[in-house]
Amino acid sequence: MSNPSDPIPVTRELLRDWGLPDAGDSKNSRGRVVVVGGSGLSPGAVRLAGEAALRVGAGKVGAAVSPEIADVIRMSFPEAGVFELGPRGRKAESTLAAELIAADAVLIGPGFDDPRETLARLRTIAACDVACLVVDAFAVAAITNVRRATLPDILIVNANLDEASILLGREPEDIPADVAEIARTHRAIVNCYGVVASPDGDVWEVRGGGPGLGTAGSGDVLAGAITGFAARGLTPVRAAAWGAWTHARAGDRLTERLGLGFLARELAGELAQAVREV
């Protein structure tokens, strides 16, 4: 068990030692992702997350969104299968439910802007037999309002500091120790600001990325990368660490070329090259 005060550094050498699952010979062998999210205010979050999952090697992505933005996603994200969410509070329609069950990893949260809707959608997703669930954005806070036993055994939390405060019930003071506490309390793999913790107390840390990562949509790209790695078959800890490192390295690569001011869509496009470096 690692000490939260002295996290294990996530380096190229560590990731190379861990390796990645064999890609196989078709999209079906590389992992299947569903992203649940989006709103009229932030329809692009689903595309950013879904593209990130594909850029780190996932083979197929589905986008489950409200009817009001379904056509926007169809036109802007031709690589995705698009599923329309039904009325809030109802069971998932059979086609979507089958897709959720078939998915290797499901991400919920990017682009949602209503806490009550997010909670209702989380409950709907949890009612399906989801193999691995990644929660992001409003869905992070929503897990405090559902019983842990109703969520999938494999749960990955991608939180920013505000969301970490909600999970802790206080302001974070020592990020590695606090992320480890969240992981224990919620029996989840947790990533927050490049610190990854498991419920058994192990803690890793990704360094790099820089201030350029503080841009609209960056968190959606990060969540999508983690989900993509999980769908490829990595363990939850390794998926979170690979996702956090790749996201940070993409930021460093863009900073080296462009300086401050790159866009989240450019981050997504840089992920494949970051993986290739390893």
Image (cartoon, rainbow, N blue to C red):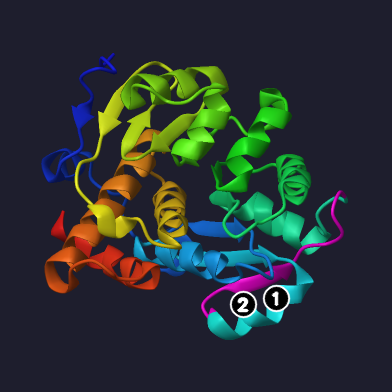
Q: Are marks 2 and 1 in contact (CB under 8 Å)?
A: yes
Residue 26 horizontal/vertical position (percent)? 42, 68
- Pointer 1 residue: 70
Asked where in the image residue 203 lies, by quadrant, the reply is: top left
| Quadrant into which the N terminus falls | top left
- Identify the residue shown where x is 61% and y is 77%: 73
| Relative to 147, 135 lies left or right | left
- Identify the residue shown where x is 77% and y is 72%: 67
Which amino acid, by three-letter code, is at mark 2?
Answer: Ile
Asked where in the image residue 237 lies, by quadrant, the reply is: top left
User: What range is drawn magenta here?
Assistant: 77-89
- Pointer 2 residue: 73
Residue 34 disc label: none
Q: Nearer the viewer, residue 182 or 94?
A: 182
User: Of helix, strand and loop, which one carries label 2?
Assistant: helix
Residue 144 horizontal/vertical position (percent)? 66, 29
| Relative to 217, 124 lies left or right | right
The outermost residue toward the bottom is 75
Residue 157 horizontal/vertical position (percent)? 50, 37
Which amino acid, by three-letter code, is at mark 1?
Answer: Ala
Q: Nearer the viewer, residue 36 or 21?
A: 36
Few, some or many residues within 10 Å of mark 2 (<14, 14–19, 20+): many
| Relative to 172, 131 lies left or right | right
Residue 25 visible from this viewpoint: no
- Identify the residue shown where x is 47% and y is 57%: 220
Q: In the rendered structure, does residue 88 fall within the stretch colored magenta?
A: yes
* Main secondary structure along the magenta-highlighted residues: loop
